[in-house]
Amino acid sequence: MAELGHQVLGMDSDVDKVHALNSARAPFFEQGLDDLLAKHTATGRLRFTASYAEAADFGDTHFLAVGTPQLHGEQAYDLSHLFNAVTQLAPCLNRPALIVGKSTVPVGTAARITDLLHATAPAGQAVRVAWNPEFLRESFAIRDTLNPDRIVVGLHPSGGADETLLRTIYAALLDRGTPFIVTDLVTSELVKTAANAFLATKISFINAMAEVCEAAGANVHQLAFALSHDVRIGPAGMQPGLGFGGGCLPKDIRGFMVRAGELGAGQALSFLREVDAINTRRRSRMVDLAREQCGGTLKGKRIAVWGAAFKPNTDDVRDSPALAVAQTLHQMGANVTVYDPMALDNARKLYPQLDYANDATAAVEGAALLLHLTEWPEFSQLDPHHLSGRVASPQVIDGRGTLDPVHWREAGWTYRSLGHS
Ligand code: UDX
């Protein structure tokens, strides 16, 4: 928003994060974000506070970007952080304001937030609500935000003035021809969960094909490449491997199923249970392959794991397929050493019982098996000839299909990959 030319006050209840952000340090790794923070904290267009009262006093428009994770031990969304934020902001809203939801929510949440604000904000009905779902991908966050495919805005039936305000806020993007799609509130909430359900389905489709390829002795990478030339299918989301993780796709398909069930439309989304199951099976398949390569037992075997983040170019380890596999191998008695270029600190906090190495080569020292589980570019640039002298046994299983099998086999490695017998 600061880059688009607005005056911005960021609000977070975590004082440490506020301090870090005011010093232009993001509380997570995202390429280019620290530079952008430095640029706009310097221009004075961007600063941060932990005070709801200050935020309410400052803002004509309030974007709610609060996390909506999966409820612990359940499939539904945990909306407590979001409602807590609204509950605390509302009593401070003494003047007209537009509250714009960006969080991914079960359909119907915007209406509940509207009721809560109207009941508890001193400005009452002068506090308006719109929904503007966020489609950015981690590791492409800045690019996706400043060059979105589309802007979707959900409005109350009487939201004409809200549309005008949002068009002004996004004017720089609209001038460049970005599609601006206006819907009612419930449809805009559904656009987001439906988009993530589709993306998850596409990934699980190609991973289901990987299972068939393994059984038939075919090569899923060649299959995916051939399919992707059909413009109706396309190459995006067609990378087979260990499947999807992260803070969005897994919990969004689960929360979506729960909400559809509450609405009496559960059957319509029952296929998402299979999408989830295919995804989870990739992780067990990787563990089975590892055990097979280790001669039937993992007990006491040294296994090197490359990758801890749920995908490359992020330090996010939420529902990371790589760490889930590493942890299962550890539970089955293997000595697992993990290396990741960015996510080691976060991985250590979540799985202190695993061993960690400071570089990719140190991780493979004495290993009976190497697993390539997150496709950081540096891994495909490493020389397998150099590495083969370090391991106890030159065996690699490529969980992402981005290492060059010819190159690794020439260097004396046994190379296997998911989706290829
Ligand atoms: C996703 C959506 O893409 C984004 O629009 C939404 O706003 C948030 O959720 P993100 O979780 O950042 O974004 O990552 P994405 O790039 O979609 O990847 C999700 C997972 O799927 C990763 O674990 C990735 O490794 C995996 N993936 C992705 C595949 O296994 N194969 C693919 O072809 C693409």
Image (spheres, helix red, strand yellow):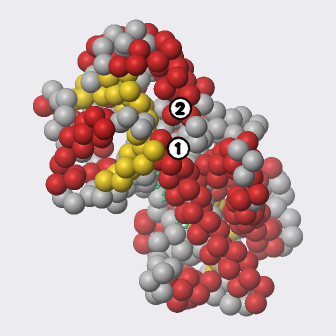
Identify the residue at image location x=24%, y=44%. Answer: 167
In the image, 6 versus 185, the foreground residue is 185
Please state which amino acid type lies under the numbered disc 1: Val
Q: Position of residue 3 (x, y in %)?
A: 20, 42
The answer to whether 89 is drawn above or below residue 150 in the figure is above
The answer to whether 377 is drawn above or below residue 116 in the figure is below
The 10 Å Cα crowd at callout 2, few under 14, some 14 to 19, many 20 or more, is some
Q: Residue furthest left?
A: 43
Identify the residue at image location x=54%, y=86%. Answer: 227
> Which quadrant of the view contains residue 28?
top left
In the image, 13 versus 371, the foreground residue is 13
Q: Secondary structure at mark 1?
A: helix
> Which quadrant of the view contains residue 106?
top right
Q: Quadrant of the C terminus?
A: bottom right
Q: Which residue is mark 2?
A: 111
**Count of marks overlaid on the render:** 2
Query: Does the numbered disc 2 mark a residue whose Cβ is under 8 Å from ligand 1?
Result: no
Judge from the rendering whether residue 1 lies leftward or rightward of residue 385; answer left or right.
Answer: left
In the image, 134 versus 322, the foreground residue is 134
Question: Pointer 2 and pointer 1: residues touching (CB < 8 Å)?
Answer: yes
Q: CA distance from mark 2 to mark 1?
A: 8 Å
